[in-house]
Amino acid sequence: MNPNHFTVVFLAALALSTGLRLWLDLRHLRHVRAHREQVPADFFGRIELVDHRKAADYTAAKVRIGLAEIVVDALVLLALTLGGVLGWIDQALRDGLGSGYLHGLALFACAGLLGFVIGLPASLYRTFVIEARFGFNKLTWPLWLADLAKGAALTVLIGGPLLLAVLWLMDAMGKNWWFYVWLVWLATNLLILFLYPTVIAPLFNKFTPLEDAALKQRIEALLARCGFASSGLFVMDGSKRSAHGNAYFTGFGRSKRIVFFDTLLEKLAPQEIEAVLAHELGHFRHRHVIKRIALSAALSLAFLWLLGQIIDQPWFFDGLKVGAGGTAMGLLLFSMVLPVFLFPLAPLTSSLSRKHEFEADAYAAQQTAAGDLITALVKLYRDNAATLTPDPLHSLFHDSHPPASQRIARLKPL
């Protein structure tokens, strides 16, 4: 391919992706605002108008900062590629470190640090302004700094050796390096799934065994009916960071844990907690986690194969104006531009995720009362200020869960 032709293709894809993101967000903003003064019929009497307005305003605030981030992200990508910034960083590192593995690690570190610094203002505004304004933020500056330090340490300790292994495999394994990299990537992800509940998650949150005897007995009976074995029922101190509530099961094999946010236990009745957990167990029963891991593995294999076909092509690097090519630059550049081409396909993965959510809801209705799951969902949408009136097209691209009205409509006959 001619480098200039690829430049045009990249610019067209970036314009399409950015324009589509902006258009969808503006649609969503207008749609939510247009329905701000009227609680949907399915929620009339369940959701107060004041809560519905709060959800609309909360959504609008998040969309507005999201619009700014879309524009900034596009401009930064243009500056790094066609603007020559990434090429300049690469050359400066080569001059100082040579072209070995240390150069590759430093290149990724510089790109990651630059992305973090550019995205920091929006991240802080979202947490300490928007979340605080609507009563959700509980994060303090010392805790934020501690989380940042721990996250950086994990990135270095896990990401550094993994990246080094990937770069070595790309250099040492010939034309089929992409298959060996995929094997390492898959093994690392499975290892993290296994270690996350007992090693990684406790670094950020405190997990204590569920003490409510009556609730514990109810949940254990549900687990027995569903044939689910876990290593324990735990309560997480989510309230030290946010007022949002949730429940989930995590881990792999014998390390599976059921985790409740302390905020969730405060807001829902025992039978509603049971229904929410039954929904999560529905994902287990239908093997959704395994299916998602398999899909992720297949997609990653396809993308690595694609990278293997273009990483030695001069038009890829010349078309994006990054100067010299190389293993590290090819991997970094591919990871930066691939999302530009993939975003229009987002409804495909979103539709699959929604299908899984409907199946989990149906399973929960078999194991518990559907009415309990409905009331739990209503409370969760209300307390988390989740909009009840999303723009359908925006939701199709961005939301992994179906809109509340669709979930409740399917649950009512059950």
Image: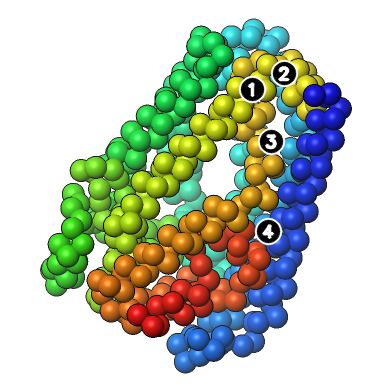
Identify the residue position indicated by label 4 in the image.
65
* Residue 305, placed above or below residue 244: above
Look at the numbered discs 1 and 2 and tell me whether their residues touch, using CB distance below 8 Å: yes
Side (left or right) of 256 relative to 133: left
Label 4 vs label 1, nearer the camera: 1
Q: Where is residue 128 in the image (x, y as percent from the top left)?
A: 56, 58
Tell me the distance, in whole angstroms, between the alpha carbons under discs 1 and 3. Answer: 16 Å
Q: In this view, does 145 lie above or below 68?
A: above
Disc 3 residue type (three-letter): Val
Disc 2 or 4, which lies upstream in sequence? 4
What's the mark number on residue 337?
A: 3
User: For the residue marked with disc 2, what is the amino acid?
Assistant: Gln
Alpha carbon distance from label 4 to label 1: 38 Å
Residue 275 shown left or right of residue 350 in the figure: left
- Residue at 45% over, 37% down: 297
Per the image, label 1 sits on a secondary structure element best described as helix
